[in-house]
Image (tube, helix red, strand yellow):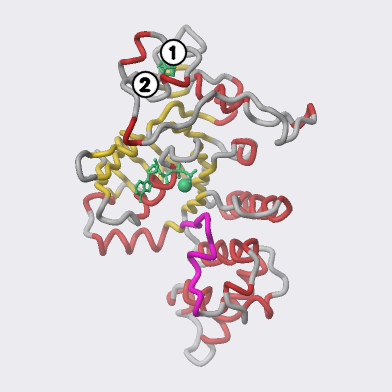
Amino acid sequence: MQLLDIRNLTIELKTADSVIRAVDRINLSLKEGEVHALVGESGSGKSLIAKAIVGALNNRWTVTADRMHWQGVDLMRLSPEKRRKIVSKDIAMIYQEPSLCLDPTANIEDQIAESIPDEFLKDVSIFSRRSARKHRVIALLHKVGIRDHEKVMSSYPHELSEGICQKVMIAMAIARNPKLLIADEPTTALETTTRAQVFRLLKSLNQLKNMSVLMISHELEEIADWSHTMHVLYCGQMVEAGPTASLFNLPLHPYTQALVKSMPDFEQGITHKEALYALKGTIPPLAHLPIGCRLGPRCPQAQKACVVTPIVERSHGHAYACHFPLIKGK
Ligand SMILES: Nc1ncnc2c1ncn2[C@@H]1O[C@H](COP(=O)(O)OP(=O)(O)OP(=O)(O)O)[C@@H](O)[C@H]1O
Ligand code: SF4
Ligand SMILES: [Mg+2]
């Protein structure tokens, strides 16, 4: 079943003398049980898209879309209150910096307990609710791999490591049994072992609970083997999208190819620290975007025609935006 179906999502920021288009006509769809990866360099618009889906952008931003359907209901056409109700019931988001998102003044038990909806306890007698809620908090902590629940429950966020805080955020996110979990770079601040644990946890939530995941990362290798579909962004535009395995084996867009080539080859024993193939240069600031294809100044395949913005085309089951795809014969 189709859960999310977004057409032409555009996110703009008004500045004193211009309008900056940070996300430009993105299409994105996601089915029940699907893990969809959203990848791209820092500044490509990944977090803006995630925040637009959950309605968390402040009013400095203008968000438009031809449609943003959640299970067939257009979120863009709902009142803020109705939208919040649907989103908080069905969609949960975990953020990159958990210690900033947790309440510093409340202990972990209270924070997780608050995320458990009252209706989950409606069959429990009023006298037993408190202990039933506590049992759920403990079960959630165990689910995210925290065994030492007593100590963690009585702690405040500043007393815990980033890794534990991240797991607490995940516990809070899954407390409602959301249909979709949006994970915005959930492991960036974590050390390797905890990263692997968090990924294993997200993977098992997907496989055992059929929870869909929109996984945001700029590190391809982390999500390469467990996302079904992938969306590659550059400077707020979709450059290529399609089934993950196919994007890896047959990238059509020069940027996707560069990302794939920049991945460490574990079989060959290449580590992160060695020089890796990548495109020269850096992503341009939004206020100084090049004309036409935004990758132009960094693209090894660029030609004169690239001063015209490429339209989205389809081939080999991918959608891509490039005048000169790497594989011809659409
Ligand atoms: N509050 C803001 N004010 C001005 N520009 C912003 C703001 N937030 C984001 N941007 C700009 O919007 C663009 C997209 O930002 P976004 O945070 O979505 O990128 P991202 O892909 O999530 O990057 P990262 O991998 O670093 O998290 C960037 O160019 C960023 O500078
Ligand atoms: S349109 Fe041109 S500049 Fe853009 S990615 Fe394709 S070849 Fe490179
Ligand atoms: Mg981000």
Q: Amino acid at mark 2?
A: Cys
User: Could you tell me which secondary element the residue under label 2 belongs to?
Assistant: loop
* Labelled disc at residue 293: 2
59 or 174, nearer to the observer: 59
* Labelled disc at residue 252: none
Pinpoint residue 313: horizontal percent, then vertical percent: 38, 19
Task: Say left or right for 241 vs 160.
Answer: left
State which tag comes first along the sequence, 2 or 1: 2
111 or 275, nearer to the observer: 275
- Residue 136 location, quadrant: bottom right
User: Could you tell me which secondary element the residue under label 1 belongs to?
Assistant: loop
Task: Say left or right for 35 vs 75.
Answer: right
Stretch of the chain drawn in magenta: 93-105
CA gap, disc 2 and disc 1: 9 Å
User: Ligand 2 near label 1 (Cβ, under 8 Å)?
Assistant: yes
Indicate whether 202 appears above or below 166.
Answer: above
Across the whole image, how many numbered discs are drawn on residues?
2
* Labelled disc at residue 302: 1
Ligand 2 occupies quarter: top left
User: Ligand 2 near label 2 (Cβ, under 8 Å)?
Assistant: yes
Q: Which residue sits at x=51%, y=79%? A: 106
Q: Amino acid at mark 1?
A: Ala
Pinpoint residue 75: horizontal percent, then vertical percent: 28, 51
Q: Residues within 10 Å of mark 1 (few under 14, many from 20)?
A: some
Indicate whether 39 appears above or below 97.
Answer: above
